[in-house]
Amino acid sequence: MFAALFISLMAFQMASLSCGHKPSHWSDRSAHRSVGGFIHVVEISGRLGSKVMSHPGSLALDALGNLVICDTGNHRLVKVKPDGTFLTEVGGFGFSREEFNYPAALATSDGVNLYLLDSDNDRIVTLDYDLNWIAEESLGFIQIDPPTGRGSGIAVSSFGDLFYADPDNNRVVRFDTRFEVVSELTEPGGFLDPGALTIDRSDYLYVVDRDQQNIVLFDSYDNYIGKIGEGSLEDPAGICTDNDDLLYVIDRKVNTISLFTRDGKEVFSFGSTGIGQYQFRQAHSICVSREGWLFVSDYAGDRVIVYRPSGS
C-alpha cells in the first residue's frame, strides 16, 4: 500500500521520486516540505533471549543502530538488531542491581550511555552500550520540594542534563549530570499530566501534555516556545524527532503516527487500530534511525514493527 507514493525526499535527504496511491491518513499541509510513506520491513515478536516478549514499551537506538526495547511485561531490557536478531538482555523482576520493576522509559543522547527510568523502583539507572550496569540514582534522595512523584518519561540533552516528567506534580524537572536540580519547567497555563519526552538536535525539549492533548515545546534554555498538535491529537503518547527535526507523535486512542514540523504543521500520518502491518492494537513508543527507519512498539500487540522510508 505504501510502496508507491508521491513523495518529496527532502525530509530523508534523497534525490528521486516515487509515485502511486496515497494512504488513507495522508496529510500534506506543510508549505515547506512533504514526506513520503513507510514500507513495512519486519515484525519483532515472540521469544527474544530467555523469554517471549511481553508488552514492549519504550525504545531507543544505540550508536550502531541496534534497538533496545523495554520488555515491560518481563521487567527487562532486550537489545536486538534492526531485523530482530537477539543480541543481549538484562533485568527481570526485582529491586536489586540488574533487576527492574516496571522499566518505563529509555533515553540516550549518543547511543553509548543509556538511561532507564526504573519506575516502580523509583530510580534512574545508567547502562553502557552492552547493557552493563554503570550506576543508579534514587529519586527519593534528590533534594526538591515537593518530592518527585512516579515518573512518566525521561530525556537527555547533548550536555548530559536529564529531564524527568513528574505528572504527580505537573512539572518537568531538569537535572545536571550530578542529579542536582537545575530547573523546573511548566507551560504558561500549567501542565496537565506530562508524559513522554524527547530532545532534538538543537536540544529543544518536547513534552507530551496528555490531558491537554498536545505537545509542548521548549528551547535549550528552558524557554516556552509553543504547542504542537492542538486540535488534532486525542491521546498523544510516544514521541521522537529525526535528523530533519520532524516530530513523530503516536496518538494512542486512534493508533496513528503523525509527523509535524517544529512550527506545528502536520505533514504526514498513517496507521489505524488492528493487527495488520500498518495497524496497532496499542501503539506506545517510537524511535527513528539516522537513515529514517522507524521502530514502533505495539504494547498490546506484543510486538515491535519496523519500517523503512519509501524510496530507500
Image (tube, grey):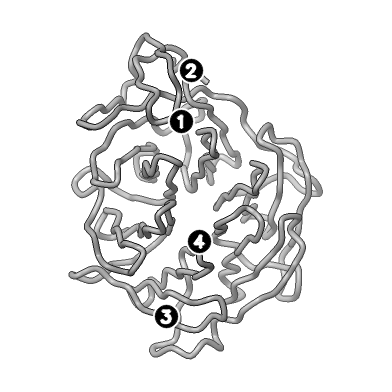
Marks 3 and 4 sit apart, C-alpha to C-alpha, by 15 Å
Distance from the alpha carbon under mark 1 to that under mark 2: 21 Å
Label 3 vs 1, first from the N-terminus: 3
First-in-chain label (1 vs 2): 1
Which quadrant holds residue 268?
top left
Per the image, the residue denoted by label 4 is 158
Helix or strand or loop: what does disc 3 sit on?
strand
Mark sitting on residue 311: 2
Q: Nearer the viewer, residue 1 or 265?
A: 265
Q: Are marks 3 and 4 in contact (CB under 8 Å)?
A: no
* Callout 4 secondary element: loop
Q: Nearer the viewer, residue 214 or 245?
A: 245
Marks 4 & 1, CB-CB < 8 Å contact:
no
SS at mark 2 in the image: loop
**In this view, 301 is above or below 220:** above
Q: Name the residue under label 1.
A: 279
Asked whether the residues under the numbered discs 3 and 2 touch, taking CB atoms below 8 Å apart as contact, a structural biologist would say no
Q: Where is residue 242 in the image (x, y as percent from the top left)?
A: 45, 42
Q: Residues within 10 Å of mark 1 (few under 14, many from 20)?
A: some
Give the residue type at disc 3.
Val
Query: Is disc 3 in contact with disc 1, using a CB cutoff of under 8 Å?
Result: no
